[in-house]
Amino acid sequence: MAAELARVGADAVFSYAGRTADPVAQPLPMRVGGFGGVDGLRDYLRAEQITHVIDATHPFAAQMSWNAYHACKAEGVPLLSHERAPWVAGPGDRWQGVADMAGAVDALPDHGARVFLAIGKQTLTPFAAKGANHYLLRLVDPPGDLPFGNVSVEVARGPFDLAGDLALMRAHQITHVVAKNAGGTGAAAKLHAARALGLPVIMIERPETPVRLRAETLADVMIWLDHQSARLGV
């Protein structure tokens, strides 16, 4: 999306949450960090004279989506959600759907499992309740202190491929995979590898987000922007 907006010369800014130390550079002006809740985002929209907002956050960044919804509604700024489709289990998959992190913890054995915990670093603490399992983490940045000690860490940035994830799971003798249903292609290889190895996947479903206008494809996003610009006479 950033590349397309830059190509057409859109006056746009790309906002990162600041979760990683070295975010990928974008072909648009970038800002990094939070806004300070709904009120802070409202202030930003006014100060920068923002006329449109595209919520393209991670499907599990629900708080940001709610903040954008309330701030845009209060300021009268058109809002579009650009959301990739969720993953869907196919033939050969052994998925167990759970509602949240607590459900994922409950679904794991009490001990003896070797778990590829593919959920990032923000929500690891609940898994300390089953610290007798061994956990493999794959993170963009070194994690610092962790809530459990029986752990291996791979520092890597996606996208990942099937061959690499098969090799990773075999090397660590993985018995279970825990994943967020983020959708998209960049992190889907672990699911294909789990299918090939016959491993169970504990799939955490997406949190609730506001009901708003949504676009799944980049083409639909650009059509929406064109229509909005025409309405404003831009």
Image: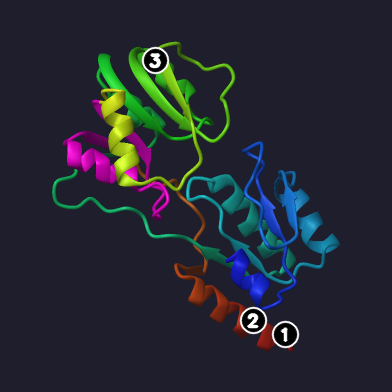
Q: Which residues are magenta?
A: 175-203
Of residues 192 and 223, the one drawn nearer to the viewer in this rendering: 192
> Pointer 2 and pointer 1: residues touching (CB < 8 Å)?
yes
Membership of 232 in magenta stretch: no
Category of crowding for the residue at label 2, using alpha-carbon neighbours closer than 10 angstroms: few (below 14), some (14–19), many (at least 20): some
Q: Which residue is mark 2?
A: 228
Q: Which residue is mark 1?
A: 232
Q: Is residue 81 visible?
A: yes
* Colour option used: rainbow
Q: Which residue is mark 3?
A: 129
Q: Would you place residue 51 above or below residue 227 in this image? A: above
Label 2 sits on a secondary structure element that is: helix
Label 1 sits on a secondary structure element that is: helix
Of residues 169 and 130, the one drawn nearer to the viewer in this rendering: 169
Dividing the image into 4 quarters, which one contains the N terminus? bottom right
Of residues 201 and 35, the one drawn nearer to the viewer in this rendering: 201
Disc on the earlier residue, 1 or 3:
3
The amino acid type, in three-letter code, at marker 1 is Leu
Residue 166: x and y, percent?
A: 28, 37
The amino acid type, in three-letter code, at marker 3 is Ala
Disc on the earlier residue, 3 or 2:
3
Identify which residue is drawn at 75% across, 72% down. 11
Identify which residue is drawn at 19% across, 41% down. 196
Q: CA distance from mark 3 to mark 2?
A: 49 Å
Residue 27: x and y, percent?
A: 68, 62
